[in-house]
Image: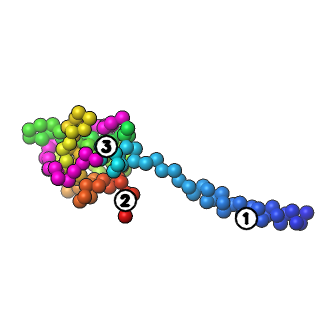
Amino acid sequence: MKKSLQVIIALIVVWTPMQNQAQMTIKFRGSDGWGLASRYEQMYTNFSLQTYYGTVTKIDTVIPSSDMGSGISVILKTANSEELVHLGPSWFILHQDMNLSNGNKIEVKGAKVSFNGKTVIMAAEVESKDRILYLRDEDGIPYWCAWRKK
């Protein structure tokens, strides 16, 4: 009886750490189509960066293509036109400490591209009042793409 109790305790001691290790494994969902290897992200280039000034007339969700998750976009009314500006994936943008609403005057630094038949500005920075939201680094890599090659 004493021997079998020792065996059971030994099994529990060995088995418990293995269970905890197994529970520590995390399955990552990926970038939801917004990653560096996506067709969408490959459209971005720093060589075509421009600055756009205007007023936000609409904030909405957008799905740039069928293989992507939702993103956040704004319609920017400039002096000459209305521009569709993609800020980034919803799961990233909605967790930023920013206050953006219709009627805000903003400055957007971004690259204008044609994607799936629409002309859009892929934002790198958005400035509103005394705040700035950095969306891409100086190489154009989005801040939501944290895993990088060495």
Q: CA distance from mark 3 to mark 1?
A: 50 Å
- To which residue does mark 3 refer? 39
**Whether residue 97 can be seen here:** no
Under mark 3, the amino acid is Arg
* Classed neighbour count for the residue bearing mark 2: other residues with Cα under 10 Å, few (<14), some (14–19), many (≥20): few
Is 31 magenta? The answer is no
Local secondary structure at mark 1: helix
Name the N-terminal-most of marks 3 and 1: 1
**Foreground tag (3 vs 1):** 3
Under mark 1, the amino acid is Val
Under mark 2, the amino acid is Arg
Query: Residues in magenta?
Result: 42-66
Name the N-terminal-most of marks 2 and 3: 3
Q: Quadrant of residue 80?
A: top left
**Residue occupying the point 30% across, 38% down:** 64
Q: CA distance from mark 2 to mark 3?
A: 17 Å
Q: Please state which of residues 136 and 126 is positioned toward the viewer in this rendering.
A: 136
Q: Please state which of residues 55 and 7 is positioned toward the viewer in this rendering.
A: 7
* Classed neighbour count for the residue bearing mark 3: other residues with Cα under 10 Å, few (<14), some (14–19), many (≥20): some
State left or right for residue 16 relative to residue 23. right
- To which residue does mark 1 refer? 13
Quarter of the N terminus within the rendering: bottom right
Is 59 magenta? The answer is yes
- To which residue does mark 2 refer? 148
- Asked if the residue under mark 1 is in contact with the one under mark 2, i.e. CB atoms within 8 Å, the reply is no
Name the N-terminal-most of marks 2 and 1: 1
Residue 39, how many percent across, how many down? 31, 43
Quarter of the C terminus within the rendering: bottom left
- Asked if the residue under mark 1 is in contact with the one under mark 3, i.e. CB atoms within 8 Å, the reply is no
